[in-house]
Each structure stands twice: as structure tokens, then as C-alpha cells.
């Protein structure tokens, strides 16, 4: 299947949209790292154009004191593939990730 032919204006609009979405995803990761938003509140939202395309491992690595190894371990325990995106999680994976988020936030408060 070949890519559709875009006019220069359509191509520019698509590039601007992609750049805007990348900036918004980066801002969400920054807010997670700073503790401005909670992981559970992010997971409670219905995945949209921005959050639905975020990789789960990137979200977990954005949490304070969670790096690649810990994120990988969490995903392995839950049964989430490395390439999974937030919008592609099964109901069971969503539920277990939400339970992790709540435990993480309780531990952080203590």
C-alpha cells in the first residue's frame, strides 16, 4: 500500500500537527516527572489522540525514581509488551496498571 500523495500545504499541516502532539506528550511526561499530575489520573482518562499513542514504557519511565529496568520489570509482571501504547492496553492490563499506579502514589505519600 502506497502513501497518499499530499499537497505541500497538506504535508505542512500534517507536520505541524505531529509536532504539536509530540510537544503535548512531552509536557505530560514532564508533569509526571515533576509530580504535577498523578499516573492514576492519566490512566483514568479515556485515551485520546495524545495519550492513546504514548508508549507505556515511556510513561512509566517518566515517573520519579522509575528507570528503564524498573519500568521493564513492571511491564513484565503485568504482561505488557515493550511496544504497547496506552490506547492499546486490554481491560485487564489497564486494571493492573491502575492498581500499580495507586500503590505507587500511596508509597510516594508515605
Image (tube, rainbow, N blue to C red):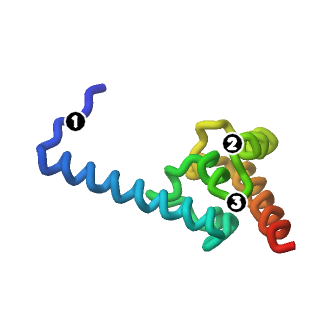
Instruction: Answer with left or right where residue 52 lies relative to residue 41.
Output: left
Q: Which residue is mark 3?
A: 64
Mark 1 or 3, nearer chain start: 1
2 vs 1, front mark = 2
Q: Is residue 12 left or right of residue 88?
A: left
Label 1 CA crowd tier, 10 Å (few <14, some 14–19, many 20+): few
Extreme residue in the top direction: 1
- Residue named by callout 2: 68
Instruction: Kindly report which numbered mark, 1 or 3, lies closer to the viewer in this rendering.
Output: 3
Q: Residue at x 75, y 61 (%)?
A: 101
Q: Where is 68 relative to 99, above or below?
A: above
Dot 3 falls on a residue whose secondary structure is loop
| Residue 17 point in image, percent of width and height | 30, 56
Q: Say whether disc 2 or disc 1 marks the residue closer to the N-terminus.
A: 1
Q: Secondary structure at mark 2?
A: helix
- Distance from the alpha carbon under mark 2 to that under mark 3: 12 Å
Which image quadrant: the N terminus? top left
Residue 9 percent location from the top left of the image: 13, 50
Spot occupied by residue 24 in the image (x, y as percentages of width and height): 44, 62
Q: Which label belongs to residue 4?
A: 1
Marks 1 and 3 sit apart, C-alpha to C-alpha, by: 42 Å
Q: Nearer the viewer, residue 27 or 50?
A: 27
Amino acid at each position: 500500500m502506497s502513501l497518499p500523495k499530499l499537497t505541500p500545504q497538506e504535508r505542512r499541516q500534517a507536520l505541524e500537527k505531529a509536532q504539536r502532539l509530540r510537544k503535548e506528550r512531552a509536557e505530560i511526561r514532564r508533569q509526571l516527572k515533576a509530580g504535577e499530575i498523578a499516573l492514576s489520573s492519566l490512566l483514568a482518562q479515556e485515551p485520546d489522540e495524545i495519550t492513546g499513542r504514548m508508549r507505556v514504557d515511556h510513561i512509566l519511565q517518566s515517573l520519579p525514581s522509575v528507570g528503564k529496568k524498573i519500568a521493564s520489570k513492571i511491564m513484565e509482571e503485568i504482561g505488557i509488551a515493550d511496544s504497547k501504547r496506552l490506547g492499546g492496553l486490554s481491560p485487564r492490563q489497564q486494571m493492573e496498571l491502575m492498581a500499580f499506579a495507586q500503590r505507587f502514589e500511596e508509597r510516594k505519600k508515605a
